[in-house]
Every structure is written in C-alpha cells, then in structure tokens.
Amino acid sequence: MVATDNGIYISDKAKEKVIHLMQEAGVENEPNYFLRVGVVGGGCSGLSYKLDFDNEVKPMDQVFEDKGIKIVTDLKSFLYLVNTELEFSDGLNGKGFFFNNPNASRSCGCGDSFAV
C-alpha cells in the first residue's frame, strides 16, 4: 500500500471480513453505519486499537472511505493512526484484524497494542 494522502486504509481481505461482520450484525444495508477505529490507553505496549460499528459521527471525527468502506475515527486517535492500513489474517499464526501502522515504534507479540 502506498498512501497518496493522509488517511486510514483497509486491505481487500479486511474489507471482506468487515462486510461479513456487518451482515452478521444486520447493519450491512444501513447507510448510517460505518467502521469506527480508535486508540485507547492500555495493553502491554501502552496503547491498544479499538474497532466497532457505529452510526453516529461526532463533531471532531475524521471520516475516510477506502474500497467502499466508510472508516471514522476521533481526532486524537487519528494522530496515532494516520496512514495506517487495517488488515485481516486467517492464517495459522493467528486470526483476526491487525493494524499495519507506520507510526508505531514497537508493538507487542499479540499485535493488539503498540507504542509510538
């Protein structure tokens, strides 16, 4: 992935999984729903990623769209997530979403937390 501007991106495999999860949650046909990504304090490296479906954009939210998926984050989290790509793995080394974050100086073995 080569970032053309500052944003948050999603891989093809992660897009497929997000669509599947939205279908399971019954919100795939709800145009107000989107993927909310964020950063919260905690985890073994100091900061953890957070993913959820949401339908309310707040005044300071940053809104992006990649591959037809609307991605929203709060301004504080965006400072940590700029030019990050959300990916999904179903391989033998672990199944789930992970973030390919160029801003992280280190991350933990579980891939759920990071430091800058």
Image: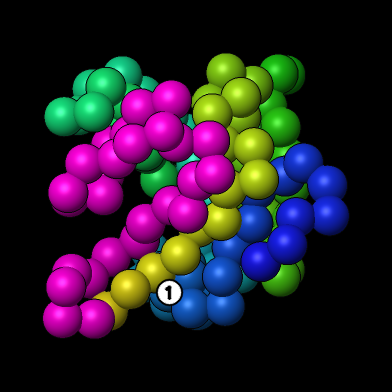
Helix, strand or loop at label 1? It is helix
Which residue position holds label 1?
A: 17
Q: Which of the image's four quarters has the N terminus?
A: bottom right
Q: Which residues, given as a range, are shown in magenta? A: 91-116
Vertical arrangement, residue 4 with respect to residue 12, above or below: above
Q: Give me the residue at 46% from left, 65% from top.
A: 87
Q: Does 78 lie within the magenta span?
A: no
Please identify the quarter of the rendering in which residue 65 is found: bottom right
Q: Locate residue 45, reporting x and y percent.
A: 23, 28
Neighbor class of circle 1 (other Cα within 10 Å; few <14, some 14-19, many 20+) is some
Q: Is residue 67 left or right of residue 114?
A: right
Vertical arrangement, residue 114 with respect to residue 87, above or below: above
Q: Is residue 32 visible?
A: no
Q: Does 114 lie within the magenta span?
A: yes
Q: Which of the image's four quarters has the C terminus?
A: top left
Q: Is residue 108 left or right of residue 51?
A: left
**Closer-to-camera residue (80/59):** 80
Q: Locate residue 16, reporting x and y percent.
A: 50, 79
Q: Give me the residue at 64% from left, 37% from top.
A: 82
